[in-house]
Amino acid sequence: MRHVITLFCLILLTVGSVSANQESHRRLAIQLVRIYEKDIDESYNISSEADKLIQQNPALRSYRQPIIRFMQKYLNRNQLKQYLVIAFMREFPEDKLKDIVEFFTSPAGNLWREKSSQFDKTIASIVNSVFAKHKTELMQMIKEK
């Protein structure tokens, strides 16, 4: 009987530990979503996302409004953030998520987030300058097609 009670106590401790670990893992995922909350709020637009979906599948064009209503119901910003919490928990072990959160809350991480939003513009500028620099060669390649 003593062994059964000991085993039962061990099981309860393990379950409690898993639950506590899950909760701390979830808190870290929420913290990471909060770090990106401004970016999410500025970049996530249901109409634009619906248009991207329709662009990938033009047969959906006549269903744009129902798609938007559906997304407003099931994929609004708050729901998206909850899905991101789940995705972060699934994709990153708790110890790695802790490292990521620590980095992004550090001065270097803040600088990275600040500058990384400019990278799209930087990349576009690089691509445009390479096209401009080699425009003649590009035109020749197009003609040879």
Image (cartoon, helix red, strand yellow):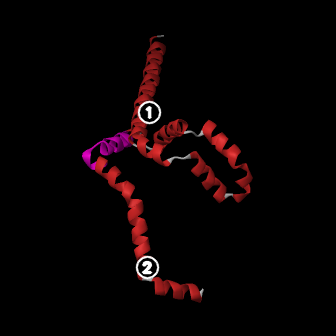
Is 80 positioned to the left or the right of 36 in the image? right
Is 13 positioned to the left or the right of 75 in the image? left
N-term-proximal mark, 2 vs 1: 1
Nearest the camera: 30 or 127?
127
In this rendering, is residue 7 above or below 61? above
Nearest the camera: 132 or 110?
132
Q: CA distance from mark 2 to mark 1?
A: 48 Å
Is 69 positioned to the left or the right of 19 in the image? right
**Amino acid identity at mark 2:** Ala
Where residue 97 appears, as percent x and y from the top left, is: 38, 41
**Amino acid identity at mark 1:** Arg
Instruction: Tell me which segment is drawn in magenta.
Output: 95-109
Task: Quickly name the residue at label 2.
Answer: 132
Looking at the rendered structure, which numbered label has been put on residue 65?
none
Which quadrant of the figure has residue 129? bottom left
For label 1, the crowd category at 10 Å Cα-Cα, with few meaning under 14, some 14 to 19 and many 20 or more, is some
Specify whether residue 123 is painted magenta.
no
Task: Quickly name the residue at label 1.
Answer: 26
The C terminus sits in image quarter:
bottom right
Which quadrant of the figure has residue 127? bottom left
Measuring 45% from the left and 30% from the top, which residue is drawn there?
Answer: 22
Where residue 12 appears, as percent x and y from the top left, is: 46, 19
Measuring 35% from the left and 44% from the top, which residue is drawn there?
Answer: 100
Measuring 43% from the left and 79% from the top, which residue is drawn there?
Answer: 132
For label 2, the crowd category at 10 Å Cα-Cα, with few meaning under 14, some 14 to 19 and many 20 or more, is few
In this rendering, is residue 114 above or below 27? below
